[in-house]
Image (cartoon, grey):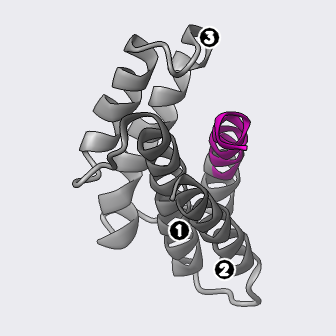
Amino acid sequence: MERTHFEQAKLWLEGAKYIAGYESQDRSKYNVAVAKLVHSVIKANDALTYKFLNTIARKHDDARRLFEDLVKRNFIKSEDSSYKEIIQDAINNKAKAEYRISFFSKEDFESFKRKVERFVNMAKGYII
């Protein structure tokens, strides 16, 4: 099951890249792309928590706490503990992107995308 969550994380990430590259001048495409990045982080985290704790976050806000549990239980190396900040960024960006509380620029998208790619790659090291 953790592989299914991880595969979905990769698909969300690829979907975000596709949307961001879509030939449209509408600024809201970056909001949609950022929302997809949020889901990529959540699904990658679900892959980790399912593998080691046999559970996933029921609410997005639980994702960071579950990741911190993985670190405390030494399933995730302490040097990877800072990845919890990417989860928090995802949670913070979720409502902003989905409810258009703010608009994301191409630069905002690119910056967050790099963080998400790092998170997914970190998760890959534990899942595969």
Residue 7 lies, in percent from the top left, at 64, 64
Q: Earlier in the sequence, mark 2 or mark 1?
A: 2
Is the residue 19 above or below the residue 34 in the image? Answer: below
Expressed as whole percent of the image width and height from the top left, the position of residue 40 reads 55, 58
Query: What is the x, y in percent for residue 65?
Result: 29, 30
Mark 3 or mark 1: name the one nearer the start of the chain. 1
Q: Which residue is mark 3?
A: 79
Which image quarter is the C terminus in?
A: top right
In this figure, which residue is indicated by the disc labeled 2? 19
> Which residue was labeled with disc 1?
36
* Position of residue 27 in the picture relative to residue 117 (left or right): left
Q: Secondary structure at mark 2?
A: helix
- In the displayed structure, 8 sits above or below 81; it is below
Amino acid carrying label 1: it is Lys
Q: CA distance from mark 3 to mark 1?
A: 27 Å
Q: Nearer the viewer, residue 107 or 127?
A: 127
Magenta stretch mostly in which secondary structure? helix
